[in-house]
Image: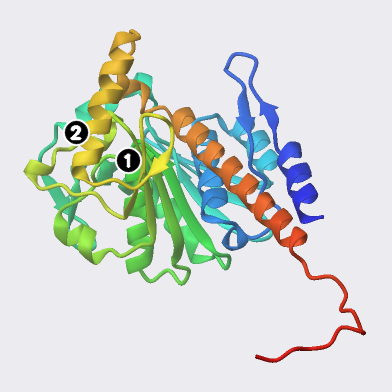
Amino acid sequence: MKRSNDVERFGKAMQKVCDRHEKPLILRSMADRPVAEMTQLEQSLLMAELSMVSYNDPDEARWAAASLGFPDLTFYERDGSQAYRFRNQYDCVIACRGTEANEWNDIRADARASSVLSETVGRVHRGFKREVDDLWPMLETALMCNRQPLWFCGHSLGGAMATISAGRCLLSHIDSNPERLFSFGSPRVGNPRYTQYTKVDHLRYVNNNDIVTRVPPAWVGYRHCGSEIYLDRRGQIRKSGFAGKTRDRWIGFWKELLNGKIDPFEDHSIHHYISVIAQALAEERKSGARNTDDREKIKPGPTDPNRKNSSH
């Protein structure tokens, strides 16, 4: 029964939400229960799709968020910095708007800034901090009244903004602490002191050759936060050391180059992240269904009352 209900729920969530001038959004998630009750992959897919939705204007985002199970939406904007608050009866999610692959110049311009400014603890990137500073008074006011489990997410620049915002929330007087932070294709944010002290539960997704995850450079003092989840060139989630990832990235780069594509930019798309996570989730559900079927097959039958017990 549970398997059929999951399939039905998953099918209903496969909805197309689009503006007539834009590419349709295909949404696979459904927040019909608390996020904390979802598996890690279910959480990740939902947060990746909310990160994708945050690129849209408020009218379209409201439609898409409602399809994902978040009927309550608030849009925050100041001087080009943007974020959404998505809420339902269970949870509150802050999704920061990022920079899409065709807006690489914006990320590159910010990445050139080698200096860092003081954050609550440690030091963070000047450009990313400025984006958060623009929105923080509004976000802080909203979060002070929050009584629901709180989640943060973002893609690209939005991942960096979500990282800083979640860290501020954790270290501030705000009562609700972040349950978990999800970033997809995020650049490096701060120095070692910042990353070591600001201990947010953070899942940081990196897609193969995604160029944005390599800026600003480590040699000028920047470090990544959180636990890395690496997506390889075949579109699979895998654990790999430095040498394994380096080899995988080189193979991915040259294969895409032979196909006329520039892999570091192609891999930055939020749609690539969603596709890989959705496939991993589908395999997880198939595996769970097989395990359930196997348990049903080996379920012991009724005991024969005439059978004698034997002892050894």
Residue at the right extreme?
306
* Residue 125 placement: quadrant: top left
The quarter of the picture where the N terminus appears is bottom right
* Residue 245 placement: quadrant: top left
**Measured from the top left, where is residue 10 in percent x and y?**
71, 42
Which residue, given by chain and number where applicable, does mark 1 sit on?
A: 186
The quarter of the picture where the C terminus appears is bottom right
Q: Amino acid at mark 1?
A: Ser
The residue under the point 31% across, 55% down is 226
Q: Could you tell me which secondary element the residue under label 2 belongs to?
A: helix
Measured Cα–Cα span from mark 1 to mark 2: 12 Å
**Measured from the top left, where is residue 309 in percent x and y?**
79, 89
* Residue 181 placement: quadrant: bottom left
The residue under the point 32% across, 33% down is 208
Label tally: 2
Q: Nearer the viewer, mark 1 or mark 2?
A: 1
How packed is label 2: few (under 14 Cα within 10 Å), some, or many (20 or more)? many
**Measured from the top left, where is residue 59 in percent x and y?**
63, 31
Q: Is residue 134 left or right of residue 152?
A: left
Residue 111 badge: 2
Q: Amino acid at mark 2?
A: Ala
The residue under the point 61% across, 45% down is 73
